[in-house]
Amino acid sequence: MTNTSKGLIPATILTGFLGSGKTTLLKRVLSEAHGQKIAVIENEFGEENIDTDILVTDAKEQIIQMNNGCVCCTIREDLRTTLSDLAAKRRKGELQFDRVIIETTGLADPGPVAQTFFMDDEIAESYLLDSILTLVDAKHAEEQLNTRQEARRQIGFADQIFISKSDLVDAAAVDALTHRIKHMNPRAPVHKAHFGEAPLSQIFDLRGFNLNAKLEIDPDFLKADDAHDHGHDHAHHDHDHEHGEHCNHPHHHVHDDDVKSFVFRSEKAFNPAKLEDFLGAIVQVYGPKMLRYKGVLYMKGSDKKVIFQGVHQLMGSDLGPKWMPGEKKASKMVFIGIDLPKEILLQGMEGCLV
């Protein structure tokens, strides 16, 4: 996963459970006057293509449908072919489009779709994966998150999360849902989207997969995380712990979701070789359960920040900006995954420090 270069076609993955409003959001984006031509790749089950007819007539977009059900490897192969054909037609001037949106079926795991953009050289040379957007239906989210791991995974993968149908439930339910989502994925901003209304600035060019030094983590999550976690105290300061006494959030302990996130932090430098060995070993064992992980790391022997991120077993790192004079050097890494062994990971990371 290297940094972006010019001329790549940006791609957005749109995911979310059935009825969460993906098609509504998509229609809005296609009909908005942004002057961009968008190719839409649909990966839906069976006979759900009524919407695409509407999209074609309304928006005059070139739409490619994939009705191959939902087995990850078939998607990966078909998606690869579809993306490759699209890029070839664009190069020859047969098709015009500025970006691609891949709408996944309600039950899909976005992981293999995202991996296609990194594992295949031809695809990586034509496209830039911009972000994964996840829609969550406020009315049915609780039941879906309680009963379906796919719904929880979709939240873990997201770079941006939209809550739809929030007008159908009370404010307390939306707050509880938002808090639950932030514990699963503190990286992704959460917005409300009524009937697909969302500004394009929240949909396109989010650079969720860019390796950059901006590691957005929800600050409330960090405070709460510190309050519930006295064990790993290496870089936490006492004032963080006050949050525990008068924490007014509805507590997330009610739902012990299998998709969880946690943060590793330290002010000591990493030994690069040790860290590489450790992370290499960890992804071999836990890769399928590791949804997204991203960090800004302080490495021994480097005057630059090291930016690191991964999806499942794929990981990459890049040199970021220099540490500024007087800037406190520290590492911060967030892991989002399914039943990851927090202690093993945190202790292992700790063991790679100089």
Image (spheres, rainbow, N blue to C red):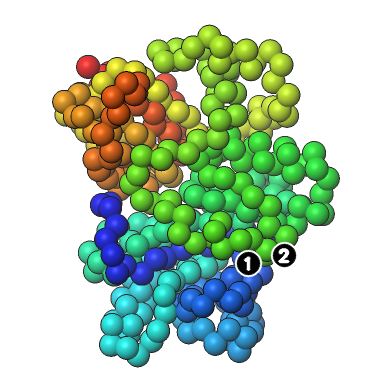
Q: Label 2, on which residue?
A: 195
Q: Residue 157 location, x and y as percent?
A: 48, 49
Q: Count the marks.
A: 2
Residue type (three-letter) at the residue carrying disc 1: Leu
How many angstroms separate mark 1 from mark 2 (CA)? Answer: 7 Å
* Residue at the (35%, 57%) spot, across then down: 115
Residue placed farthest to the top in the image? Answer: 238
Of residues 238 and 336, the one drawn nearer to the viewer in this rendering: 238
- Vertical relation: 121 (above or below) 167: below
Q: Residue 300 location, x and y as percent?
A: 20, 24
- Vertical relation: 190 (above or below) 134: above
| Position of the C terminus by quadrant | top left
- Quarter of the figure with residue 245: top right
Please tell me whether mark 2 sits on a helix, a strand or a loop. Answer: loop
Of residues 352 and 323, the one drawn nearer to the viewer in this rendering: 323
- Quarter of the figure with residue 189: top right
Q: Label 1, on which residue?
A: 25
Residue type (three-letter) at the residue carrying disc 2: Phe
Of residues 48 and 69, the one drawn nearer to the viewer in this rendering: 48
* Residue at the (37%, 77%) spot, across then down: 82
Of residues 257 and 32, the one drawn nearer to the viewer in this rendering: 32
101 vs 85, left or right, is: right
Asked if the residue at tag 2 contacts the one at tag 1, i.e. Cβ–Cβ closer than 8 Å, the answer is no
- Quarter of the figure with residue 135: bottom right
Q: Can I make out residue 179 in this image?
A: yes
280 vs 336, left or right, is: left
- Vertical relation: 273 (above or below) 315: above
Please tell me whether mark 1 sits on a helix, a strand or a loop. Answer: helix
